[in-house]
Image (cartoon, rainbow, N blue to C red):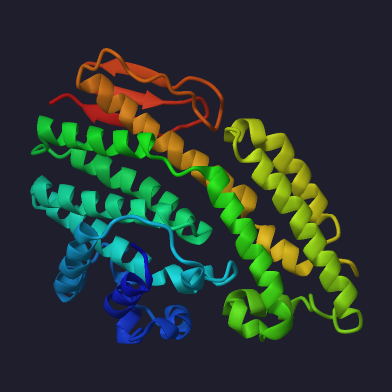
Amino acid sequence: MIRRGLLVLFTLLFAVDGYGETFKTIRQQFEIYQRFTGEIEILSTDDTKEIDNVLRRTDLKRLIVRKALVMAQPEKMSEKDLPSPLFTENYTAPFSYYITVERAFAYRTLEQNNPDDAMQSIRYVFRLTDFLAESGSLELRVLAARTRLQTLETVQALLQNPHCRHEDHETLYKIFDGKIKNRADEETIWTRYREEGERFFEDIPRRDLSEILSPNLLKELEDRRAFAHYEKEWERRFTHDRSVFDRVSEAIVESSSQPYFKRLPVLRQLDREVREHRGSAIEPVFALLLLQEVTSSMRLFAQEQSGIEMAHLALSVSLGAQNRRKLINPLTGRDYEIRLIPDGVMSTYEGNVKPFYVPYR
């Protein structure tokens, strides 16, 4: 799954305005995202008529993807199909579009008091996130985490729909239980990311930067003249950059077997070390680009894990489970909090102002 065939399928079906006819056109597609208002923006509005028009236009595409997701099995991507670590937004756009369509469909069916169709959308979105998370690509793993957190909001809308049933609670409990039991190993993710970074450094001397940097990143570097010092001392600066990446990424991999709250001191120290020379004559430009999202990505994974565990715990209590699995919040290192109210169950954790609520059915 998430092999080249599925990448092409998503690009064919969910490229903006039909500009993504082949896998190679994803870069041009990203530029279109930046310049034009596309259907994905419409789905984020409150214009019910326009949303329904988009859903009608994408209905067949959505069903084709669903069929592919049912037939496929999660597996690691081959190295030749991995995106450049610095071309994320172009690579993930068709997946994001499909996810947006499914979530919009779920909300519209809930407005029409049809929770069954909404549940199907939720199931397919979560199924796609399993494939994204198992792909071996950090970029797709980040997209999976963001999507799961967003979809928890859709789940909340389903649970509060008056037509939601006890069986729906059981289905959601099983979905979240599977996410907890089969969580992707972070050490593997960061080891693979380190390997991607090493390949990136191998590619730089023999490829044009426009081939391995996204348009946004390339423009950012050009605007602040980040390459000005490289012109005179390319070999020495490049060697320095690579050594910084190797040292820091190794420390990241070594720390990744620990829960996020135990990693924080290491991450803060690494951030200081990497960024202290930003803007100077010895700025590690490429190392900074490769490592700039590491801390935020690790926090995102912990937020995703805590969100799933919080939902799982609330559903577990609402269903009357007696032997709940003991879980420690990876963000805080503390227990989750459960509050029983007359009409349901609320779970949260210290510092989180948005609890997960499950009405009794």
For this view, does 19 lie left or right of residue 53? Answer: right
- Name the residue: 46% across, 66% down: 78
> In the rendered image, which quarter is residue 194 located in?
bottom right
Q: Nearer the viewer, residue 5 or 226?
A: 5
Q: Position of residue 166 (x, y in %)?
A: 11, 30
Residue found at x 65% / y 69%? 199
Residue 187 seen anywhere in this rendered image of the structure: yes
Above or below — where is 146 with respect to 12?
above
Examine the image and state in which quarter residue 5 appears: bottom left
- Where does residue 328 sit, x and y in percent of width and height? 49, 23
Residue at 44% x, 57% y: name it: 143
Q: Quadrant of the C terminus?
A: top left
- Point 65% across, 78% down: residue: 218
| Quadrant in which the N terminus appears | bottom left
Q: Position of residue 224 (x, y in %)?
A: 76, 75
Using the image as rendered, state which of residue 15 and residue 356 is in the foreground: 15
Q: Is residue 229 visible?
A: no
Nearer-the-camera pick, 153 or 76: 76
What number of labels is visible? Answer: 0
Give residue 133's position: percent from left, percent from top: 42, 52
Horizontal arrangement in the rendering, residue 148 relative to residue 175 (left or right): right
